[in-house]
Amino acid sequence: MAHEGMVHALKIIHRLLKTDGLLVDIHPIAEGYLIKAIQGETILFSEPKRETCSEDVIQAEKAISQVIEQGLFALDQRSEFDFLTYGSSVPELRAYLEEQSSFETDPVDDALDERVEGLYAQIEEIMQTSPADTQVAIHERAIMSLLRPVRE
Amino acid sequence: MTIQSDPEKNETRTLFEMADFGGKRVLEVGCGDGRLTQLYADKVAAVTAIDPFAQAIHRAQLKLPEGLQDQIDFKHSSIDDFARVTEPAAFDLAILSWSL
């Protein structure tokens, strides 16, 4: 969604909320995310899957700031949390992630794709020589914001 | 093993610490396959969960457990179209779940 579309959506939500209503926004933080191989409590491999976040995340932060500056919402609380998605194999996790991102509109980045393919290959190699309960995981850090609509 | 999303429940713990869901009328915008919707729906009065992608809503409806069918109304709709047919101030709580 483009920045203008995000601000527009927030304005509509403002109208749909009751006077004492609340908006919760959840989105990843801007630092990208990690791909890991984990066995029990031990992290066997951990590398950034993306060095940077997608443009959408930057725009989402800007849109939230804009509606606060415009006096439509007031920020009540913000909290960060870790969000991990585990798979028992690389193909299983990849299939899931592809399904989840099938509607994303990020442009294709060949260099990034090549790098990610390399990371998946490294994880597969580790998993082949590790105990059977080794898992592959995507580790995202996300931010949750609680916003209160402001009425004049 | 199937895919496990947030088995540590960090997301729902943060969500429930932040907002009171009891008896609320909730609008979830960009609900995708309803993963998060299912995790709070039993605490609220009703959920309307919208997504502009028909395939996502189809998946959400397929994955919906029987016990939550009366609780969640999944709608294939953009927020613009939804707002056109919805009264203002209709919801206590709105959630943008990884969708902005």
Image (spheres, coloured by chain):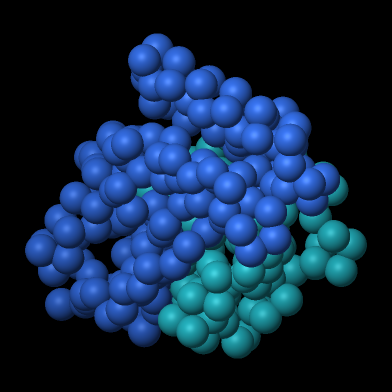
Query: In the drawing, does residue A151 fall left or right of residue A6?
Result: left
Query: In the drawing, does residue A124 fall left or right of residue A45?
Result: right
The N terminus of chain A - image quarter? top left
Q: Which chain is blue?
A: A
Q: Residue at x 89, y 62 (%)?
A: B66
Would you say residue A99 is visible in this rendering?
no
Relative depth, front residue between B70 and A108:
A108
**Residue lying farthest left?**
A69
Q: Position of residue A85 (x, y in %)?
A: 62, 51
Q: Residue at x 39, y 26 (%)?
A: A106
Image: B5 above or below B26: above
Q: Which chain is cyan?
A: B
Q: Position of residue A22 (x, y in %)?
A: 39, 76
Query: In the drawing, does residue A58 fall left or right of residue B99?
Result: left
Q: Position of residue B59 (x, y in %)?
A: 74, 41
Would you say residue A97 is visible in this rendering?
yes
